[in-house]
Amino acid sequence: MVSIGYVGNNTISSVLQMGCNDIVIVPTVLYSNHLGHSTVGGFKISEDLLTAVLNGILELGIIKEITTIITGFIGSAEQVKIIANFVRTIKILKPEIRYLCDPVMGDIDKGQYVEPDVPNALVKYLVPLADFLTPNQYEIETIIGKQINTAEDVPRLLKGQFNLNKQKIVITSISFKNLDMNLIYNCILEEKGCEIVKVQKIDLHPPGTGDMFTAYLCLLMQRGMKLSDAIKLSGNIISKVLINMLKGKRIEFELQDILYSINILQTMNYNSSTEIKTI
């Protein structure tokens, strides 16, 4: 969680709350701002504090009200283990709960921006628990330890490593050879096969874009939308937000961008009649 700006929990919680969801927020870090700035104040949450907060949530007895768990940026490998134990405990108490894991590690243009031992911990402890996994290209290549060059590579390289009877994988912003550079390609891999969903590419990359995508993907799936349609609509919402930001000559999300994204969703007359709690 950051004090300034819209990345991580700040973005995800804003979108989900404006989408009429109650949420439970558990930060793994407390930073003044995102890591892309020249200076950052703050620290990761201690393992003892994180454990105490998660245990406190369990003791409240609210798990029956929770429909979805989302994890994103995690501050240390030890935190990954603590969170994995928490997810396993909840899945025992409520097997039907959905766990969406955004395995934040880095990006193609920035490289790794989490602590050195976090990626291996994510692969070992959290990735196997995920019902939905939303890595970008850098992250999925880190997870499988191989480079992906073509759409045909995706099922060939991933099927042996994932239980596609239980897991759905959405690789975001993937780049293949000989593709239309004006489009963003998202790849869905599940039991029935591999599907490519294309959305308009906008030449602006504000921090928190992946968080906004994850939030809308979760929101739309909870409202009953098919996964491929939820991906396409989430991508289109973000594209419209980015176009609006370019007009305003802004390079980072502000509250007006979150509100604008919600307005786009509302104009599509896609409203939920169910109150959902998300952690």
Image (tube, rainbow, N blue to C red):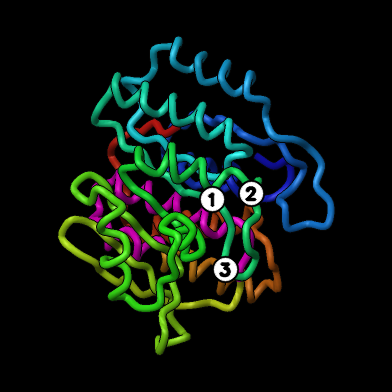
Query: Which label is found at residue 114?
Result: 2
Mark 2 residue crowding within 10 angstroms, few (<14) / some (14–19) / many (20+) = some
Q: Residue under circle 1?
A: 104
Q: Which residues are magenta?
A: 205-234
The residue type indicated by label 1 comes to: Val
The residue type indicated by label 3 comes to: Ile
Please state the horizontal and vertical placement of residue 92, each as a whole percent of the image.
29, 21
Mark 1 and mark 2 in contact? Answer it, CB < 8 Å.
Answer: yes
- The quadrant the C terminus occupies is top left
SS class, disc 1? loop
The residue lying toward the viewer, choosing from 20 and 118, is 118
Query: Which label is found at residue 24?
Result: none
Q: Is residue 122 left or right of residue 224?
A: right
Q: Residue under circle 3?
A: 108
Dominant SS type (magenta): helix
Mark 3 residue crowding within 10 angstroms, few (<14) / some (14–19) / many (20+) = few
Note whether 274 is above or below 158 in the view shown. Answer: above
The residue type indicated by label 2 comes to: Val
Note whether 20 is above or below 154 in the view shown. Answer: above
Query: Is 212 one of the magenta-colored residues?
Result: yes
Note whether 1 is above or below 132 in the view shown. Answer: above
